[in-house]
Amino acid sequence: NVCRLAQELVKTLPSQLQVVYFVNSGSEANDLALRLARATSRNHNTIVVDHAYHGHTLGTLDVSPYKYNHSAEYPSKQEGVEPPGSHIIKV
């Protein structure tokens, strides 16, 4: 069962890590990771890789350069200007 799986996973982690989250998709995993990082750091800045896919949740779309570069949602964008709070690394 899922509770037993979580207990077994925790046994493999460093002692300070005691919580396991099960999610339905990579999008949900990325969204949860963003929310946990922001809650812990109290910072909304992110570093993302240009052209990377992060998922289709509201949180992950906000840090996805492809969305920013091709969306009418950001009508005042200029070439080379990053989405608010995102720092894009060219690879």
Image: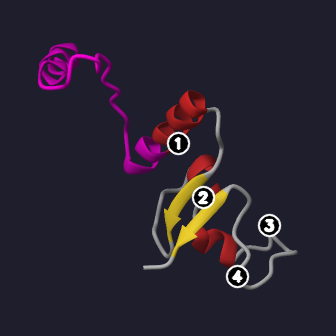
Q: Earlier in the sequence, mark 1 or mark 3?
A: 1
Disc 1 crowd, CA 10 A, few/some/many (<14, 14-19, 20+): some
Say which residue label 2 marks.
63
Q: Is-magenta flag for residue 88? A: no
Q: Are marks 2 and 1 in contact (CB under 8 Å)?
A: yes
Say which residue label 4 marks.
80
Say which residue label 1 marks.
34
Amino acid type of the residue that numbered disc 4 sits on in the rendered structure: Gly
Q: At x 46% / y 39%, what residue is drawn? A: 33
Disc 3 crowd, CA 10 A, few/some/many (<14, 14-19, 20+): few
Q: Disc 1 or disc 3, which is closer to the eye?
A: 1
Say which residue label 3 marks.
73
Measured along the vertical axis of the image, is residue 12 above or below residue 33? above
Q: Disc 2 or disc 4, which is closer to the eye?
A: 4
Is 4 left, or right, of 47 in this rendering? Answer: left
Q: Earlier in the sequence, mark 3 or mark 2?
A: 2
Q: Earlier in the sequence, mark 2 or mark 1?
A: 1
